[in-house]
Image (cartoon, rainbow, N blue to C red):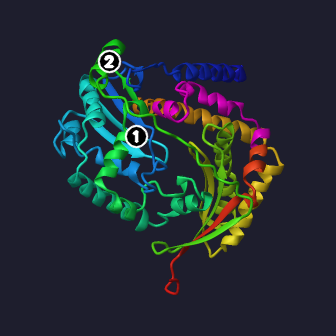
Amino acid sequence: MMNKLKLLFCLLFVGIMGFAQEVDFTEYNLDNGLHVILHQDNTAPVVNTSVMYHVGGKDLKNDKTGFAHFFEHLLFEGTENIKKGDFMKIISANGGSFNANTSLDRTYYFETFPSNKLELGLWLESERMMHPVIGEQGVETQNEVVKEERRRSYDNRPYGNVLQVIQKNLFNKHPYKDPNIGYMEDLDAATLEEFNEYFDEYYAPNNATLVVAGDIDIEKTKKLIKDYFGPIPEGNKVDRAKIEEKPITETVTDTFYDPNIQLPMLVLAWRTPEMKDRDAYVLDMISTILSEGKSSRLYKKIVDDKKQALQVSAFNLPLEDYGGYAIYAIPQNNTPLDTIKSEIDQEIRKLQTEKISDREYQKLQNTFENNFVNSNSSIAGIAESLATDNVLYDNTNLINKEIEIYRSITPEDIKRVANEYLNKNQRAEIYYLPKSEDVE
């Protein structure tokens, strides 16, 4: 009887979860090319307005890096109708919160307001798109802000340059080789004309997706969007030529010295398929098997049991043109980095030669079901998922269907992908070391 009750409960839970996670949305284009996605949820009096521009760190200007991240800051400076410094004050004064972030592939601005401030949110984002003030004063101010961020988050932070070193070793020609924040000498050398040209090229409605999610009325929201965004002129079509990289066929070895650390780090990194490739999802699962949680294979082996490492992590870096995959470990008890490398290679070899157990596979599926539920548990999370799925995956309904991709992945897929991508001759081996006095 008890087993039947447990089975009934599980079936009910799965049914409820599947129903709760269905995200309804409406999408359409304005005449100027702006893609609009609306999600109505009247359970709480809040609304999220957000714009994702299809421009990121990989989009250079005259071979200069860092422009997209720079504009993440610069477009808060002010507009023709919003005085310098008032953008953020207006949001706070009206009970809102805001932020922005830039990746190598896109830039995302968002605000959350009480739902009676929807029109304010739309006005702010339309002002950012239509009337920004890009002048010498704002550029100089934000240049100093970005330099300080570079010092704080990269150059003066322990292990702050790990991702940059990984990128440099996985890519030779593609702009993914450069840090998302850019090089300060590039921003220092950029002219005001180049900044204005960059804005005109990438921050047009036809290169953007607007998402409005929360306590809204669909028809009233459509009218407001047309009023605020409809008059913005369409920009030129963005040319997106993919830069091809030759496959890595021999192990790349690099050493980087960081004056901010006392313990070394071993990093193993591989170039992998683009984010839309199904194998990228399999690599997500491999990361979970290797290092997510204390029962994961690498954590249990070299952190818990053998006490060889203080930390170990495997992570997938899904990107639009290519992907990256990396495993890092920080040793303890003076364990040599090559010993840790050998231990990691043993676990990779197991994935390549042995199918994971049924128990481990079920645990894996449960983890991704839970991740799926959590990713769509807030209005802000839903808004970002809708924008990302449209801009980078060309499939807005992925917000409802992505879990089916993970469900379809089999133990045989995991074994195949480990064999196809995680080989020694396809990787970079990076020794990330403390800088000693005798190192120039």
Q: Which residue is mark 2?
A: 221
Dot 1 or dot 2: first in sequence order is 1
Q: Which mark is residue 202?
A: 1
* 346 left or right, relative to 384: right
Q: Quadrant of residue 221?
A: top left
**Does residue 50 show up?**
yes
x and y percentages locating residue 172 in the rendered image: 60, 59
Query: Considering depth in this image, is 17 or 272 the residue closer to the camera?
Result: 272
* 361 left or right, relative to 293: right
* Number of other residues with Cα within 10 Å of mark 1, as a class: few under 14, some 14 to 19, many 20 or more: many
The verdict on residue 411 being magenta is: yes
User: Could you say whether the residue bearing mark 1 is in a helix, strand or loop?
Assistant: helix
For this orientation, the residue located farthest to the top is: 219
Question: Quadrant location of the N terminus?
Answer: top right
User: Could you say whether the residue bearing mark 2 is in a helix, strand or loop?
Assistant: helix
Q: Is residue 236 above or below residue 219?
A: below
Residue drawn at point x = 75 percent, y = 36 percent: 410
Residue drawn at point x = 76 percent, y = 39 percent: 413
What's drawn in magenta, residue-wise?
387-414
Residue type at mark 1: give it. Tyr
x and y percentages locating residue 328 in the rendered image: 61, 61
The verdict on residue 184 being magenta is: no
